């Protein structure tokens, strides 16, 4: 049963229609190489690059304000911080050479250089996209650091398997901040399932430089690198995907599990639609070093959403696009059952071709049963304790059983 559930989860996909603006070149106001871009919503973001380049925007990238009073080093990674209760606007963290970590205050918009824990270059940083408390930063010579207060204070981790490695990117599972994947040069992959207490490592075939990694759902995501390398992963199992390009994929950005981008050499852009990767027309031939994408969902119909995406690269290159997605329509499946709304925040109604009570079971992506209950058709079900992610629901009525996909997201 567990195997059948897992295969079903991996095979069922969204039917969606995409209306896209072409990628357009934007004015970053600098000729320095840009290495990272991060947005917390469609208006607030930062870009970071060489020679002390750090800028913020509050209008979606139409204008950029340089950070003042910061060390003039190369900056390589950026991430949004989760707003605190007393924050007027989102905050951000940026990392770079000599162990520098910058914090942008959400209230004042000012930048602060945090106390460093290393002199090694830091290449990437991420704050847990779920609760926003756990953060990891990685860099040269196997440097790995962890924060438990959203990035205000840090402690360096001793991970012997990473000693001497050039670590490029880190990603945190959006449904479990204890699950972390780090990638680096020579195909190096490092993973933890317990928040960094213990680690496992492997080298992907070919020892290719890995430039990016991104969790798109529970215990699963993508990793990319030089020579067109792209791998999906579930847990510690990595599976190659053939893109048909030799361009390196140095940046990954996903709005959700069914919508994302890869960015790389010579301006290369590829788009993930939930089932296949397809090359998109790029407005530049400059190398793209990083990118990001966010989704803005319609409250009245959460399967329809708009994706805002940005990418940065060589010589101050900044490009962006807006794409509208019409997702699943609320039509009953062949068996007559319907979960509404879907995606949801854990509250949903089951509609079906029968009356009375049914049994309902919920499984995670590995096939593990998380909950079971009895409910009535058209009655509201409350599973708000579920973390954001993809689940399988099994409806049992009499001697028949039906499987459906449930997507839980934050509002």
Image (spheres, rainbow, N blue to C red):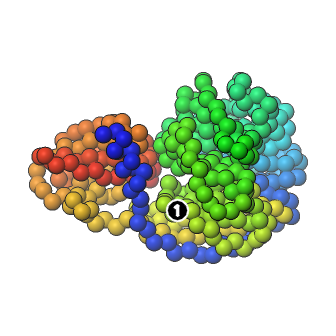
- Viewer-side residue, 317 vs 394: 394
Identify which residue is drawn at 35% across, 52% down. Answer: 405
- Res. 9 in view: yes
Residue at screen point 10% across, 50% down: 356
- Residue at left offset 72%, top offset 24%: 160
Query: In this picture, is 39 found above or below 5?
Result: below
Q: Quadrant of the N terminus?
A: top left
Give residue 22's quadrant in the image: bottom right
Query: Count of labels shown?
Result: 1
Asked which quadrant contains residue 196, the reply is top right
Locate residue 293 relative to residue 301 in the image: left or right: right
Q: Is residue 28 left or right of residue 371?
A: right
Tag 1's secondary structure?
A: loop
What residue is shown at x 48% (from left), y 43% (from top)? 218
Residue 8 spot, x, y in % from top left: 36, 50
**Which percent across, then down, holds residue 181?**
61, 38
Figure quadrant of residue 370: top left
Q: Is residue 58 above or below residue 382?
A: below
Does residue 132 show up? no
Q: Is residue 117 above or below residue 26?
A: above
Crowd rating for badge 1 (residues with CA inside 10 Å; few <14, some 14–19, many 20+): few
> Badge 1 is on which residue?
276
The spot of residue 339 in percent (x, y) is: 28, 56
List x then y, in percent, for residue 346.
Answer: 35, 47
Front in this rendered view, residue 356 or 72: 356
């Amino acid at each position: 049963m567990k195997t059948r559930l897992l295969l079903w989860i991996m095979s069922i996909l969204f039917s969606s229609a995409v209306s896209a603006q072409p990628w357009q070149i934007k004015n970053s106001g600098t000729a320095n190489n840009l290495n990272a871009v991060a947005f917390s919503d469609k208006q607030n973001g930062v870009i970071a690059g060489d020679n002390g380049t750090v800028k913020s925007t509050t209008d979606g990238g139409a204008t950029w304000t340089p950070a003042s009073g910061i060390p003039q080093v190369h900056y390589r990674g950026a991430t949004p911080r989760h707003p605190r209760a007393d924050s007027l606007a989102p905050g951000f963290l940026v990392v770079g050479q000599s162990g520098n970590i910058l914090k942008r205050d959400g209230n004042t918009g000012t930048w602060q250089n945090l106390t460093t824990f290393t002199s090694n270059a830091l290449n990437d940083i991420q704050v847990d996209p779920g609760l926003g408390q756990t953060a990891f930063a990685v860099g040269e010579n196997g440097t790995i650091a962890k924060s438990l207060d959203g990035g205000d204070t840090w402690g360096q981790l001793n991970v012997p398997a990473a000693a001497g490695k050039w670590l490029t990117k880190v990603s945190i599972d959006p449904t479990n901040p204890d699950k972390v994947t780090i990638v680096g040069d020579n195909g190096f992959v490092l993973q933890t399932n317990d928040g960094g207490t213990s680690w496992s490592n492997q080298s992907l075939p070919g020892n290719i430089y890995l430039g990016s990694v991104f969790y798109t759902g529970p215990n699963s995501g993508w990793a990319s690198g030089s020579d067109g390398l792209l791998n999906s992963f579930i847990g510690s199992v990595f599976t190659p995907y053939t893109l048909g390009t030799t361009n390196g994929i140095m940046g990954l950005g996903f709005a959700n599990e069914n919508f994302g981008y890869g960015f790389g050499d010579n301006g290369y852009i590829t788009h993930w639609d939930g089932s296949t990767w397809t090359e998109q027309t790029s407005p530049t031939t400059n190398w793209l070093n990083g990118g990001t994408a966010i989704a803005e969902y319609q409250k009245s119909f959460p399967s329809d959403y708009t994706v805002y995406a940005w990418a940065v690269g060589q010589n101050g290159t900044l490009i962006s696009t807006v794409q509208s997605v019409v997702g699943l329509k609320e039509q009953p499946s062949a068996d007559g059952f319907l979960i509404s709304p879907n995606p949801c925040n854990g509250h949903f109604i089951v509609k079906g071709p029968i009356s009375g009570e049914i049994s309902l079971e919920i499984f995670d992506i590995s096939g593990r049963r998380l909950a079971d209950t009895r409910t009535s058709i058209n009655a509201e079900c409350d599973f708000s304790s579920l973390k954001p992610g993809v689940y399988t629901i099994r409806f049992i009525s009499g001697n028949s059983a039906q499987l459906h996909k449930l997507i839980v997201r934050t509002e």
